[in-house]
Amino acid sequence: MRKQQRPEVADWFTADDGAPRLMGTRCTACATPYFPRNTLACRNPQCASRKDGSELAEYLFSTRGRIWSYADARYKPPPPYVSPDPFEPYVVAAVELEAERMVVLGQVVPGFTVEDLAVGMPVELAVGVLYEDEDAEHTVWMWRPVDA
């Protein structure tokens, strides 16, 4: 029997409809996006709504971007971060999202090494398993290289 999948970081991403999406907020006045979600006020100094109190609405981010930077993660992160036991090195990528033009960091799906990646390479959002325990597969967003 397959284990239940549980997002490791609640309310930062969803795959409820089968398509993974990062979840954040966006200012209704100036359209500045925020990830993770911002619940206080727009921080854009150019936003006219800052004086009157800005409204932030739920926002689902675009799913594609290009690698801005990447690196190996060859050491086990310290607590409170959780990783598989035994630890397996992985690759992280900073990805500039197409529509929002902002950079979001995340793991690259297993099976790719730094030798497989390049700055400017197109990627798409995916969901992968960070670690498993007795109850569930704990999931996070990841980046998967795609053909341009």
Image (cartoon, rainbow, N blue to C red):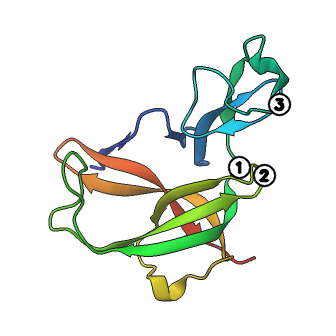
Percent across and percent down for residue 105 are 51, 57
Q: Which residue is label 3 attached to? A: 30
Q: Nearer the viewer, mark 2 or mark 1?
A: 2
Q: Which residue is label 1 attached to? A: 62
Q: Quadrant of the C terminus?
A: bottom right
Dot 3 falls on a residue whose secondary structure is loop
Percent across and percent down for residue 117 are 55, 82
Residue displayed at 75% across by 36% down: 32
For the residue carrying disc 1, how many other residues have a C-alpha within 10 Å: few (<14), some (14-19), or many (20+)? some
Disc 2 vs disc 1: Cβ atoms closer than 8 Å?
yes
Q: Which residue is label 2 attached to? A: 99
Percent across and percent down for residue 10 are 42, 34
Q: Nearer the viewer, mark 1 or mark 3?
A: 3
Question: For the residue marked with disc 1, what is the amino acid?
Answer: Ser
For the residue carrying disc 3, how many other residues have a C-alpha within 10 Å: few (<14), some (14-19), or many (20+)? some
Residue displayed at 56% across by 71% down: 69
Disc 3 vs disc 2: Cβ atoms closer than 8 Å?
no
- Up the image or down, 132 lies above or below 107; here it is above
- Up the image or down, 37 lies above or below 66; here it is above
